[in-house]
Image: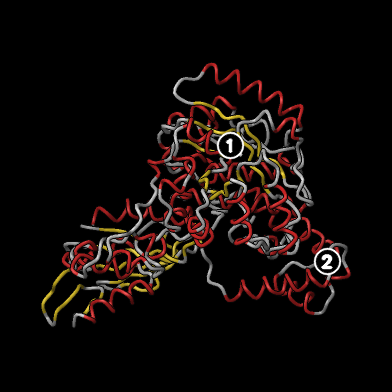
Amino acid sequence: MPIQNAEIAAIFDQTAELLEIQGGNPFRARAYRRAARTIENLPRSVVSLLAAGEELSELPGIGKDLAGKIAKIVSSGRFDVLQALKRKLPGELVAMAELPGLGPKRVKLLYDRMHIRKLEDLRRAAEAGKLSELRGFGEKMEQKILAALSKATRTQKRFKLSEAEAEATSLLDYLHLAAGDIAVAGSFRRRRETVGDLDIVATGRQLDALGDRLVKYESVAEVAAHGPTRTTVILRSGLQVDLRVVPAESFGAALLYFTGSKAHNIALRGLANDRGWKLNEYGLYDGMRRLAGKTEAEVYARLGLDYVPPELREDRGEVDLAREHRLPKLVDTSDIRGDLHAHTNWSDGVASIAEMAAAAKERGYEYLAITDHSRHVTIAHGLDASRLAQQIDEIDRVNETLAGIALLKGTEVDILADGRLDLSNSILSRLDIVVAAVHYKFDLSRKAQTERIIRAMDNPHVNIIAHPTGRLLGKREPHKVDMERLIAAAKERNCCLEINAEPSRLDLNDVHAHAAKAAGLKLAVSTDAHTTHELGYMRYGIDQARRAWLEAGDVVNTRPLAKLKKLLKR
C-alpha cells in the first residue's frame, strides 16, 4: 500500500528522536527533522513525485542520500536505520521523549542511569520519588512528569490540522469517484488546531457504494464498522474516519449537524423549536413537511440567519450577530500582502535570501521580512551583530535585483531572561522590522514571564512579539503569561502580537487572538517559514485568525508596504 507523506515524516522524526537519545551526531538528527518538515508540507505526495520521475534531492533539506532513503521507504514501507535504532534502544523511549519537560537528553539520562525504557517504569520511578536522585530532576519535575503521564492516558490522540488535512485531501480524492456531494465536517471543517477524527458527509447514487469503497482504501488499517449509511475505519496513522452517506436533499442539514460545534447546533435547534419546527441531520421540518436541508445556507436562511462560516460556529455570539446581519467579514488568505517572519540559510533555514524572495513573489506577495535568529539560539546558528550587519548588506544587494517584491531587513531577536534583547540597539536601529521571541526559560512564574515580555516591548525597536505563549501542540504546554496584561501593554506601546502559522504552534490561540481584537490591538499573521514550501503555512494562520473573528483590518500584513511601514513605527 502506498505510503503517505505524514508517515514518512513520522519515520524521520522518530529516527531523529532515537539518534538524540542515543547521543549521536546532532547534525544528523537535525537533518532528519528538517527532511520530515519538508515532506510533511509538500503539496504533492512523495509517491506521485517519484512516479513522475522528479528528483527528490532538489527539495529543500533533501540531499541525494536522504532522497535514496525516502525512495526505499516508499518501496518497502520500512526504514532500516530506524529498525536498527529500535533494536539498540528498545521500549517506549520515543513516547517518553515527547512528554512535556523531558526530551531526548533527559530520556537518555533516565535510560543510562536507571534503565527506564517504558512509560510504566517512568511512572513508578516518579511516584517513588526516585527521579530526584538524578541531576536536573527534582520534585517539581517528578510532578510534571506524573501530570503529563496522567493526561496522556486519558486524552484521545489528536492530530495537528496539517496532518489531518493531508489525510483528508488524499481520502476525498479517492472517494469522490463514487460520490455526489462530499465534504469533511467536524472540527476539521471548523479549522480547529487539532483534530480527533475525520467526519465525512457524502451523497451517492448507491448508498452502500461509498462505504464499500472506503473499506478498500489503501491506508485503512482497521474496519471498525461497515453499513449502508455509516462506515468507520482507522487509518494507518491512527486517525479515525467516520463516513455518513445521506440523501441529496439532506446533505446541507447533515453537513451542518456534523460540522458542529455541539453548542452551535443546540442554539440553532433552539431557534427551530421556538417556531415549532424540528432541526436534525436530515433537515428542517414543520411536522412532516421539509422546510430546508439541501444546503446549509438554505437552513440558515429559513431560520432567519445569515450564513455562519464554519470557523465561527462555537456559540460565542455568532448566532445573534447572524440574526442581526452583523457577522464580521473574516480575513482571507487573498488579503495577505506579505509575510513578516521568515528564516533563511543564514540561520536555521534551508533556502537563500533570493530563493525565499522568489517564492514569496510567486505567491503574489508585495513584501517578505527576513528575520533570522539572533545569536542566543546557538542551535539555530543565530546571528551576532557582525553577521547581521553582513546580512543587511546582502538584503540590500538582493533588493536591487528584485522587481515586484521588497525584502524587509529584520531579525527574530531573543528575549533574555531579564527582558533585555539579544542584540544592541545600534544594530536593531538599522532594521525595518524586529520580531522578538522567548526561546528559553519557559518555566518562569506567570508574573516574571509577563514582565519579561513587557520589558522587551519597552524597547522602541520591537515591532512584533512572536509566538507569544511558546506552546508546541502535543509537545510543550504554553508558558504562563498574563495575556490580558500583555495585550494591554502591546496596545499601549503600539507593538503587535503574532499569530504564528506554523502548524505545531498556531500561537496565539483563537481565544487570545479574539481578546486582542476586542482590545483594538493589531496582529500579524506570519509563517515562521524555514523553507520556501513553508510560506504555504499562511493558510493555517488565517484559519486561526478567522476562528478569532479577525477581519482584514485587524491584521497588519494586509496593508500595502507603505502603510505597513507607517503602522510599524513606534
User: Which residue corresponds to the image point at 48% horizontal and 31% vertical from the top-left?
Assistant: 561
Q: Secondary structure at mark 1?
A: loop
Q: Is residue 269 above or below residue 443?
A: below
How was the colour assigned to the protein in this rendering?
Answer: secondary structure
Rendered image quadrant of residue 388: top right
Please, is residue 67 above or below residue 549 in the view? Answer: above
The C terminus lies in quadrant: top right
**Residue 315, image x, y percentages:** 39, 70
| Residue 380 pos. (x, y %) | 71, 40
Q: Nearer the viewer, residue 88 or 426?
A: 426
Q: Which mark is residue 105?
A: none
The CA span between labels 2 and 1 is: 45 Å
In the picture, residue 301 is in which quadrant?
Answer: bottom left
Q: Position of residue 227 (x, y in %)?
A: 28, 73
Left or right for 417, reference 49: right
Kind of residue at badge 2? Phe
Q: Tell me the residue at 24%/81% (across/down).
A: 273
Which numbered disc covers residue 569?
1
Q: Residues within 10 Å of mark 2 (few under 14, many from 20)?
A: some
How packed mark 1 is, by other alpha carbons closer than 10 Å (few <14, some 14-19, many 20 or more), is some
Q: Identify which residue, 309 or 327, lies in the foreground.
A: 327
